Image (cartoon, grey):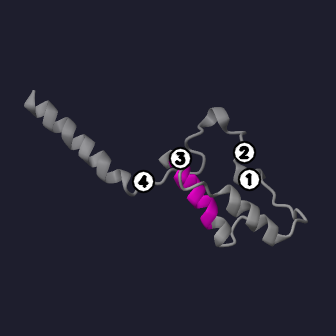
Amino acid sequence: MQHETADYDSKLNQAWEGAATFRPAKHEYLGSWWSSLKSQLDTAKIYDTGVDRDLLEQVGDVFSNYPEDFKPHKSLVKILKSRHDSITNGERVA
């Protein structure tokens, strides 16, 4: 039994070490069942909204912040921070 356990541990360790450099092929996770599905990056178009950029940045800043006495879930904090950073850096504001 110890031999089987050691062999299994060895396989798990090899998989763990390989995970650090693993990069899936594009859409590999979808498989053949979903091969006709297009990703957002393939279909998304960015249009000029006609809204002043400063106004968009101001609205984005308001929507990506929350009151100091509010404690959102840690996942939501990451999302809001990412959105705020992209607005602050001038990314993804059309």
Q: Which residue is mark 4?
A: 22
Q: Circles 1 and 2: CB distance less than 8 Å?
A: yes
Mark 3 vs mark 4: give the one in front: 3
Which segment did they paint magenta? 75-85
Q: Which residue is mark 3?
A: 72
Marks 3 and 2 sit apart, C-alpha to C-alpha, by 33 Å
Q: Secondary structure at mark 3?
A: loop
Looking at the rendered structure, the kind of residue marked 4 is Phe
**Which comes before the other along the chain, label 1 or label 4?**
4
Q: Which residue is mark 1?
A: 42
Q: Residue 38 bears which disc, if any?
A: 2
Examine the rendered structure and indicate whether residue 6 appears above or below residue 49.
above
Examine the rendered structure and indicate whether residue 16 appears above or below residue 33.
below
Mark 3 vs mark 2: give the one in front: 3
Q: Secondary structure at mark 1?
A: helix
Q: Is residue 93 visible?
A: no
Examine the rendered structure and indicate whether residue 47 appears above or below residue 54.
above
Residue count near mark 3 (Cα–Cα under 10 Å), binned few <14, some 14–19, many ≥20: few
The x and y percentages for residue 51 are 88, 65
Residue 30 image-quadrant placement? top right
**Which comes before the other along the chain, label 3 or label 4?**
4
